[in-house]
Amino acid sequence: MEMNARRLFSVKLNDGYFMPTLGLGTSAPHEVAKSKVEEAIETAIDVGYRHIDSAYVYLNEVEVGRAIQKKIADGTVKRDDIFLTSKLWASFSCPELVQSSLEMSLRKLQLSYVDLFLIHFPTALKPGEEILPKDSHRKLIFDRMDLGSVWEALEKCKEAGLAKSIGVSNFNCRQLKMILNKSGLKYKPVCNQVECHLYLNQSKLLEFCKSEDIVLTACAALGSDPRKHWVSQDNPVLLEDPVLNVIAEKHQRTPAQVALRYQLQRGVVVLAKSFTEKRIRENFQVFDFQLTPEDMETLDGLNRNMRYLKFSLFADHPDYPFYDEY
Ligand code: NDP
């Protein structure tokens, strides 16, 4: 019964595990107190979220782990009810550092495994613990990833039971194919987590991922947060889009709920970050209404291939993913 309830709002991954289709994002601007993520996760688990998206580089894995441990200790959930993602940071993107970096995350999280471990970016940085290694001219020191060997190191993490599933993030189609065509591939990536919303609906990448039984996970699905210094400041505010607002009004829902529902109906797993209780609840109320095919078509029409997350720091990197069409 419990397993069925869990599967109801989940998608089966190409390695047989299930991933809940709506997840809580945990990346916040630096000025937000770390305790906020802990409170948000506790609230979210109480509300019914079972998928939490984290990463080494969000620098809040201690708080993420503490919140999960608290909800396990008070009997709300068991460890295997929760689907937790972590990500390999760019300065650990060499085969020797993959497992040790995951183990470092697991120690912070106080967990023995993550459900999903992703290569965060295809753009490697100089290996080491410095998150953004810079030279004497304050220029970021790039490195090239040997994608095949790094992927093999992730496969070993899966086989060691440290990660149930493995995947990638911010990969374009060509970079995904480099893994898929790798000789001796043991496990395909289960997902590619990328920016995806009404203004960047990723329809071509989505079609490719579907053809390969890879889940596309949408981040920044609500248009992200311009308070983060790495988010473009000059873009229109997604949730204020007039067409989106008309459709939301018609369904007596909020623009955020429609933006999330849109992704679920096109087979995309969607993340929504909120540290505000009211919005955490609101964003979860997306399983009890349906957008019509006409609504979906209208929403598809909002696409303008516009990125909130350009990650310009990496723009000169030879493996910068966003120069390809998709
Ligand atoms: P989102 O698109 O999820 O938007 C978050 C912003 O929207 C916050 O400012 C939040 O405010 C606000 N918000 C949330 N719910 C509502 C609502 N119902 N109505 C109005 N505003 C709302 O942005 P993120 O960039 O955080 O992306 C989601 C997650 O995806 C991240 O947290 C992270 O886990 C992941 N991610 C991964 C990336 C990658 O490279 N793989 C890149 C970017 C994100 P408030 O908190 O105040 O409620």
Image (tube, rainbow, N blue to C red):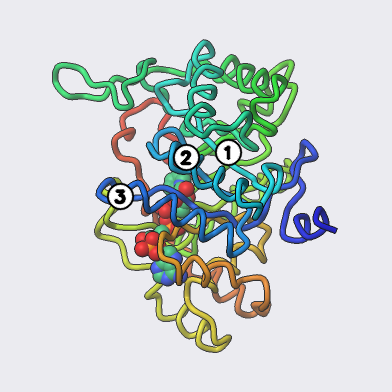
Categorize mark 3 by other alpha carbons within 10 Å: few (<14), some (14-19), many (20+).
few
- Residue 49 in view: yes
Percent position of residue 177, x then y: 63, 31
**Closer to viewer: mark 3 or mark 2:** 3
Q: How many C-alpha atoms fall within 10 Å of the one at disc 2: few (<14), some, or many (≥20)?
A: few
Whole-number angstrom distance, CA of label 2 to CA of label 1: 8 Å
C-alpha span from label 1 to label 3: 36 Å
Q: Which mark is residue 173?
A: 1
Residues at circles 1 and 3 in contact by the CB criterion of under 8 Å: no
- Report the amino acid beneath label 1: Cys
Among the 4 quarters of the image, the one containing residue 293: bottom right
Decide which of 219, 74 is in the foreground and name it. Answer: 74
Residue 159's spot in the image, x, y percent?
Answer: 72, 21
Q: Are marks 2 and 1 in contact (CB under 8 Å)?
A: yes
Where is residue 208 shown, x and y percent of the image? 66, 45
N-term mark: 2 or 1? 1
* Mark earlier in primary sequence (1, 3): 3
Q: At numbered mark 1, what does the secondary structure look like: helix, strand or loop?
A: helix
**Residue identified by numbered label 3:** 33
- Of residues 40 and 164, the one nearer the viewer is 40
- Residue 305 appears in the figure: no
Ligand 1: image quarter = bottom left
Identify the residue shown where x is 29% and y is 51%.
32
